[in-house]
Image: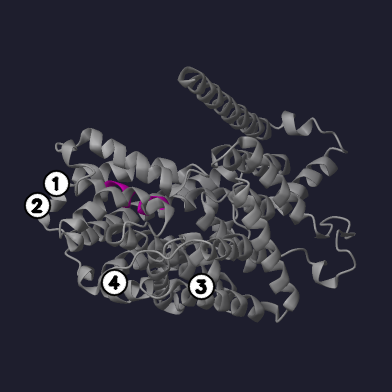
Amino acid sequence: MNGWEHAWAALTGTAAIPAAFAGVAWGMLGGALPGISPSIAMALLLPFTYGMDPITAVVLLGATYVGAEYGGSIPAILIRTPGTNSAAATVLDGYAMHRQGRGGEALGLSLMSGVIGGLAGLLLLIVLTGPLARVALLFTPAAYFALGILGISVIASLSSGSVVKGLMAGVAGLMIATVGTDPLSGVNRFTFGRPELLGGIEFILVMVGVFAMTELFTQAGLPEWEKTRARDTHIKLPNWAMLKRIKVALGIGVGIGTFEGVMPGAGGTIASFMSYNEARRWSKHPEEFGKGSPEGIAAPEAANNVVAGTALVPTLAFGIPGSNSTAILLGALMIHGMEPGPLLLAKSPDVVYGLFGGLLVANVAQLLIGILIMTPAIWLVNRPKPYLLAAIYALVFSGIYTIDHSLFDLGVVLAAGVLGYLMRWFGFPFLPLVLGLVLGYMIEANYRRALVIVNGDHWVFLRDPVSALLLGLALVFIVGSALRGWRSARRARAAEASQA
């Protein structure tokens, strides 16, 4: 079968279409809650996907990603509190329009820009994934090892904070991945006599703990967020004249979102702010930015929705997630017995093309659900925070317990939550930790396979041209990031000295 036939079979032969609608609705509700990012909304669903078929599971999670990117703009516009990090740029003009009595227009602009950006990102995902996967089929074990090292290096160097902290988090993830049974010799490692650890620490437990539990711990110490009124929830979709006005801003958002999405670690937040700045630069009405400009909403919302599609390109083609959310999707693929990377398209085309079809349904459904979900989303935001947090705790614990009916798993989730809270407190990024855990087996197994083939000669990693190139790129990213940090620190010291 060709790609279209695989997609059609997936949509008609599984529960992918209902899953797409349900995922978009859940993502919007989750995104509307301040502090609940797309990755957290996906992590909360991840335990419930165990009993699903692979196509339905990945479509559900992918649609949640799509819905959450729009859902984050709802509180950004109505209560000046972005529901997701990538919606922070939408606050600048969205809330200004709301205060002018144009909140419905701002919500409509956000929704339409998100749909257009999402469809553009999906098209780019379909176009780019296949060719990149065919190139990656040329990889040897040494090249796969170098690819994993490059992925962690890029994520560590582009994450917020110092590159040293990013690398430390990545190494911590690799260390957690060594718990369990040795992949080649079968020897038990770091199990401390606990039979629950013989199979290793499941990355789903660490993901839910680091993303969801950490956020719950953090939100418990923050004040209640602002409320809004039901009368502010009526969406007004942009007419043709408005679409003509924002077309340049939409193009800028799509272009920057494409570039940032395929760069692992960049994410929607960077793309949205860059798009906002460039839209202001090229606008015919730059004086309106910050005061209620439609272009100031269209550009960042198109950008972060494009990223939702293009961030899946390195995830599916190379097995390297481009964001926290795609790391969750990567985990879901591995839970269902698939190995993301070059062979995924060859071995499981039904899942890949089923995901493409499900994302198409999700982006189209976003228009309908975006209008219908507004009232329940605002009702949810207006609930007392203790009730919401308690409900999310119950969702986390019930979801994890249903996997293996194990109290030990609940303890691992709580421990991962404490670890994540400490990492946030000391400024360590999460994604390198998760990526190190997810890629740990690939890095270790291919490292040892490469050495077995050449009888332990470590020069194989430099003699293999692809491996040498990838390791060289990893070194460039690390050194470049370290130099940028050193220059920033030097400029900060010089500024302090001049003020003194």
The relative height of residue 413 versus residue 407 in the rendered view (above or below) is above
Element under disc 1:
helix
Q: Main secondary structure of the magenta part?
A: helix
Look at the numbered disc 4 and give the secondary structure of its residue: helix
Question: Along the horizontal axis of the image, is 348 left or right of 441?
Answer: left
Q: Could you tell me the amino acid type at mark 3? A: Leu
Marks 4 and 1, the one that precedes in the sequence:
1
Magenta extent: 299-307
**Residue at the location (45% across, 63% down)?**
223
Task: Assess disc 2: are there few (<14), some (14-19) or many (≥20) residues with their C-alpha within 10 Å of its C-alpha.
Answer: few
Residue assigned mark 4: 374
Whether residue 406 is visible to the viewer of this picture, yes or no, is yes
**Mark-to-mark CA distance, 1 and 3:** 41 Å
Q: Secondary structure at mark 3?
A: helix
Q: Are marks 4 and 3 in contact (CB under 8 Å)?
A: no
Q: Which mark is residue 241?
A: 2
Q: Nearer the viewer, residue 327 or 487?
A: 487
Q: Which residue is mark 1?
A: 245
Q: CA distance from mark 1 to mark 2?
A: 6 Å
Left or right, 59 with reference to 74: right
Can residue 350 be spotted in the picture?
A: no
Q: Which residue is mark 3?
A: 389
Q: Write the residue at 79% across / 54% down.
A: 178
In the picture shown, does residue 58 fall above or below 423?
below
Above-or-below relation of 472 to 420: above
User: How many angstroms separate mark 4 from mark 1 (CA)?
Assistant: 26 Å
**Which one is in front, 317 or 138?**
317
> Residue 122, position in %: x, y?
38, 55
Quick one: 88 or 471, which is closer to the camera?
88
Q: Earlier in the sequence, mark 4 or mark 3?
A: 4
Q: Are marks 4 and 2 in contact (CB under 8 Å)?
A: no
Residue 138 % position (x, y): 62, 42
